[in-house]
Image: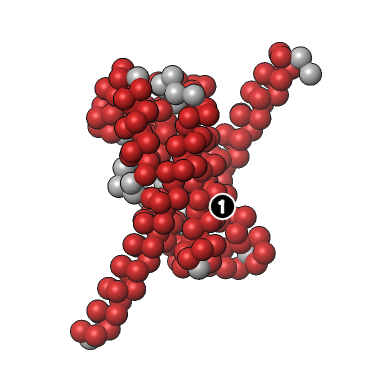
Amino acid sequence: MSRETTKKVLNIATAVSLIVIVILTIYGVRTGILTDREKLEMLVKESGIWGPLLFVLIQMVQVVIPIIPGGITCGVGVVIFGAWYGLLYNYIGIVAGSLINFYLARRYGQCFVKYFVKEETYDKYVGWLEKGKKFDKFFAFAIFFPCAPDDALCLIAGLTKMTWKKFTAIILLGKPASIAMYSLALVYAGSWLQRMFEFIV
């Protein structure tokens, strides 16, 4: 396969992927799957053996097009599949979505990033683009902690000279800790609040 043919195939695959993501997002919003936690849980539970695959796909889509906070889907994953499998499926979906974000930002540039990233968030972090290696270190540090706007930072990272190898390594190594902290904190905090409410009532 020639270089031009490969490029055309990649272009078509990218376009198709974007169309699929948009369609899934529109469907998810209209049916309430991406806006209602109970509906999301019900759909995944009723999907049987396809549940994990569907959940990973939903997690991936919400990273690329963040309709709902990622913490909500992370909590849903742990509630439905248990701590270990929930964290695994969260990890796979979020890593895949992060890689897609980096690719799209690198391919379509600043205009694309600014369309998906809030103006105040973009302005806050865009100064790091000129700091070279310092951005790489900041990015690795931010990905490790659950409070940083990971999805936006992955898009912004796509505008830097960071290599695919370094980006992938940071995501693979940094995501497990932040996903675990975020997911388990939400689940156990919710359980604690529920017990407190039952005790008071």
Tell me if residue 128 comes above or below residue 91 in the rendering.
Answer: above
Identify which residue is drawn at 61% across, 29% down.
14
Crowdedness of circle 1 by 10 Å Cα count: few (<14), some, many (20+)? many
Give the position of the C terminus as an image quadrant: bottom left
Q: Residue furthest left?
A: 200
Residue 40 lies, in percent from the top left, at: 50, 61
Per the image, the residue denoted by label 1 is 56
Q: Position of residue 191 (x, y in %)?
A: 34, 73
Q: Residue furthest right?
A: 1
The amino acid pointed to by label 1 is: Val
**38 sits left or right of 15 in the view:** left
Q: Secondary structure at mark 1?
A: helix
Q: Is residue 41 above or below residue 116?
A: below
The answer to whether any part of residue 138 appears in the image is: yes
Of residues 141 and 39, the one nearer the viewer is: 141
Report if residue 30 is visible in the image.
Answer: no
Residue located 64% across and 23% down the image: 11
Percent coordinates x, y for residue 46 in the rendering: 60, 68
